[in-house]
């Protein structure tokens, strides 16, 4: 396993289950945060699904997905925030307003990324135009539908990205800000870093290593 590959072995995410050879699930100890990883699917398809719930039996409060080519540093930032950050709790998540948008994108503004408005979309694009973040104001008006409101991407263009990460309206702004900062300032976040997957079918406190460029097709997360 590549040493740079992100790992799901984090405090609190200690209820890993492999329900089939196709997917691995990591569940937070209070059962309100669930991560699903799909193995051996196309790199452009969704590989990671992170879903947060207000209670173990409620509908999703927010959902975040990442495609298989998403680089290891970006995935590592995501997993570390979920483990050690205090901003993923759906109980503190709110609907999108000007303050949350500013918080989520401040690292990009600080880095001098280009800011444009195009109808329903607000975009922040790197000076080299090889990465960016997009906010969909229309999707944000429907917080209960879990539409893709935020898109983080890198590649030739947002229409032909190498990898993408999407998030629904109530995804907490501190989490988005951490990802935006990693995109703007981090090393190795622009290009995928393929690794191989070592399957583990265990039930306990040691989830398997997760590769940087896992591939993906969406599968069901319990509602």
Image (spheres, rainbow, N blue to C red):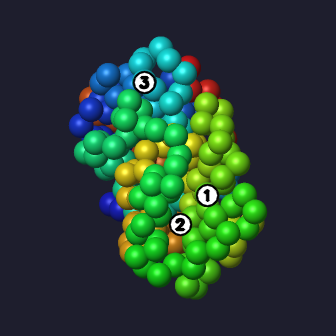
Given contact means CB atoms under 8 Å apart, are the residues at marks 1 and 3 in contact?
no
Residue 177 seen in render: yes
Viewer-side label of 3, 2 = 3
The residue that appears at 62% across and 68% down in the rendered structure is 123
Q: Is residue 95 left or right of residue 186?
A: right
Q: CA distance from mark 1 to mark 2?
A: 23 Å
Residue 155 in the image: x percent, y percent?
A: 63, 72
Q: Where does the image place residue 182, in percent across and percent down from the top left?
A: 40, 66
Image point (53%, 27%), residue name: 60
Using the image as rendered, state which of residue 25 and residue 79 is in the foreground.
79
Q: Secondary structure at mark 3?
A: loop
In the drawing, what numbered circle is on residue 54? 3
Frontmost of labels 1 and 2 is 1
Q: Which residue is mark 1?
A: 135
Residue farthest toward the front in the current orientation of the protein: 98
Residue 44's image quarter?
bottom right
């Amino acid at each position: 396993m590549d040493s740079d590959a992100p790992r799901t072995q984090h405090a609190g995410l200690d209820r890993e289950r492999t329900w089939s050879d196709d997917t691995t699930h990591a569940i937070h100890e209070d059962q309100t945060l669930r991560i699903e990883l799909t193995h051996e699917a196309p790199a452009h398809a969704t590989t990671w699904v992170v879903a947060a719930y207000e209670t173990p039996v409620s509908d999703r409060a927010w959902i975040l997905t990442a495609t298989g080519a998403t680089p290891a540093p970006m995935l590592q930032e995501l997993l570390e925030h979920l483990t050690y950050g205090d901003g993923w709790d759906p109980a503190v998540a709110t609907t999108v307003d000007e303050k949350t948008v500013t918080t989520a994108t401040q690292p990009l503004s600080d880095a001098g990324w280009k800011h444009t408005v195009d109808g329903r979309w607000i975009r922040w694009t790197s000076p080299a135009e090889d990465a960016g973040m997009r906010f969909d104001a229309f999707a944000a008006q429907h917080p209960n539908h879990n539409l893709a409101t935020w898109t983080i991407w890198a590649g030739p263009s947002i229409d032909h990205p190498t990898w993408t990460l999407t998030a629904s309206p109530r995804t907490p702004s501190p989490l988005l800000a951490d990802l935006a900062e990693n995109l703007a300032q981090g090393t190795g976040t622009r290009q995928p870093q393929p690794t191989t997957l070592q399957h583990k079918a265990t039930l306990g406190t040691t989830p398997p290593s997760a590769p940087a460029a896992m591939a993906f097709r969406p599968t069901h997360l319990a509602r």
